Amino acid sequence: MNVDCTPEEARTFFGLPDVQPMQEHLMSEMQERLSANLRSMEPDAMIRAWLPTAVKGFEQWQEMLASQMSSARTK
């Protein structure tokens, strides 16, 4: 048996609540908060926050390459 109906019709048939208005409200509020946070962050503050992690990752990558090269030499 195939039933051709829209999601809204199926939701109404099964007695489920319409959460679309709540979802739209939450999404718009989240977008406003994200935009406010991005506007308040200055570019140099973002770089200072992210740079230590990037440098540490690069150093770990260099150490991994060096260890692989030294193990390849010993073989």
Image: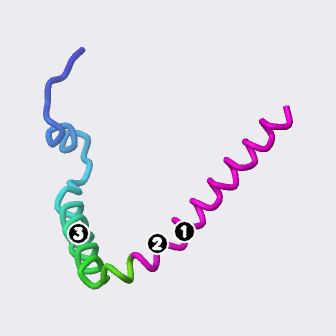
Image height check: is 2 above or below 55?
above
Looking at marks 3 and 1 on the same chain, the residue that comes earlier in the sequence is marked by: 3
Q: Is residue 37 left or right of residue 73?
A: left
Residue under circle 1?
53
Query: Residue reaching furthest top?
Result: 1
Label drawn at residue 50: 2
From the image, give the main secondary structure of the stretch colored magenta: helix
**Tag 1: residue type?**
Thr
Evaluate if marks 1 and 2 touch, with contact meaning CB atoms under 8 Å apart: yes
Name the secondary structure under disc 1: helix
**Tag 3: residue type?**
Gln
Label drawn at residue 31: 3
State the residue in front, 65 or 3.
65
Q: Is residue 75 left or right of residue 30?
A: right
Crowding at mark 2 (Cα within 10 Å: few <14, some 14-19, many 20+)? few
State the residue in front, 14 or 64.
64
Name the secondary structure under disc 2: helix
The residue stretch that appears in magenta: 47-75
State the residue in front, 37 or 1.
37
Q: Is residue 12 left or right of residue 41?
A: left
Distance (Cα) linking label 3 and label 1: 26 Å
Q: Residue at x 80, y 40 (%)?
A: 71
Residue 36 drawn at (x, y percent):
24, 80
Looking at marks 2 and 3 on the same chain, the residue that comes earlier in the sequence is marked by: 3
**Tag 2: residue type?**
Trp
